[in-house]
Amino acid sequence: MENNLIINLSNISFSYRENDSVLKNLNFTLHSGDRIGIIGPNGCGKTTMLYLIMGLLKPQGGTVEIFGRARVEEDDFAEVRERIGFLFQNSDDQLFCPSVREEVAFGPLNFGKRGQVVEDIVDESLKRVGLDGFKQRVPYHLSGGEKRRLAMATILATKPRVLLLDEPTLGLDLPTVEKIVEILKEPGLSYVIISQNLEFLKKTTQQIYTFENGRVK
């Protein structure tokens, strides 16, 4: 990666509807070691930017480069999704397995882990977010805050060094927010956090940008 550049968005434009631009010539970079916070009003394009990075949407203009390669086709994003942990704003978009254990085990199993190694990862990840003893619970029946913590555990289980977190404190009580703060202090992480919780961003990020008129400022 040239200059440790992880994400490079150049002149990105995106519209959900014709003549209604959400992103306008957006430029954004994330280098190794960066811990960036982004604030801005609802509907301004923050989540859309993360979707473009993960390949869940395609820009109408500009280039998406991640880990030193242009990402255009669906296959280009397989590596991105393996190496970047993405927390959706809505936890229901992220959870799909019949049990908490299976949710957390899905990533490690997909990466070739097996047996007791997987069980240890599940236990450790759930403990870190305060969900000890939840392994056999049904995700659908969890509260909103519990689903948020479970979604975070599924990301931690794959041990990514790069994170994109969309409103990670949504629905969480203060003690759980503090757990997330401690997790994000782990050395070697690079991340982008979208949040309306300015105090949380001050504790976890080095730079805080504002998203306005389809651009990061």
Image: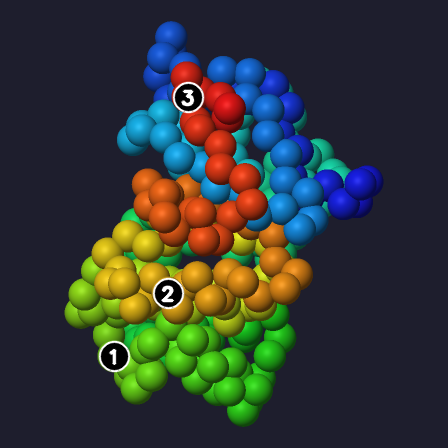
Could you say where residue 93 lies in the image, as x and y percent from the top left? 33, 52
Quadrant housing the N terminus? top right
Could you say where residue 184 lies in the image, as x and y percent from the top left? 51, 61
| Foreground pick, 119 / 29 | 29
| Residue type, numbered disc 1 | Arg
Residue that appears at 68% across and 43% down: 31
Residue with the mark numbered 1: 137
Q: Nearer the viewer, mark 2 or mark 1?
A: 2
User: Which comes sooner in the sequence, label 2 or label 1?
Assistant: 1
| Residue type, numbered disc 2 | Glu
Residue 24 visible from this viewpoint: yes
Residue 50 visible from this viewpoint: no
| Badge 1 vs badge 3, beta-carbon distance below 8 Å | no
Q: Disc 3 on helix, strand or loop?
A: strand
Image quadrant assignment for residue 179: bottom left
User: Which comes sooner in the sequence, label 1 or label 3?
Assistant: 1
Determine the CA span between mark 3 and mark 2.
Answer: 29 Å
- Considering every residue shown, the one lying at the far bottom of the view is 116
Could you say where residue 72 lies in the image, as x and y percent from the top left? 63, 33
| Badge 3 vs badge 2, beta-carbon distance below 8 Å | no
Q: In this rendering, is residue 60 above or below 46? A: above
Residue that appears at 29% across and 73% down: 98
Determine the CA span between mark 2 and mark 1.
Answer: 24 Å
Q: Disc 2 on helix, strand or loop?
A: helix
User: Which comes sooner in the sequence, label 3 or label 2?
Assistant: 2
Determine the CA span between mark 1 and mark 3.
Answer: 41 Å
Residue with the mark numbered 2: 178
Residue with the mark numbered 3: 212
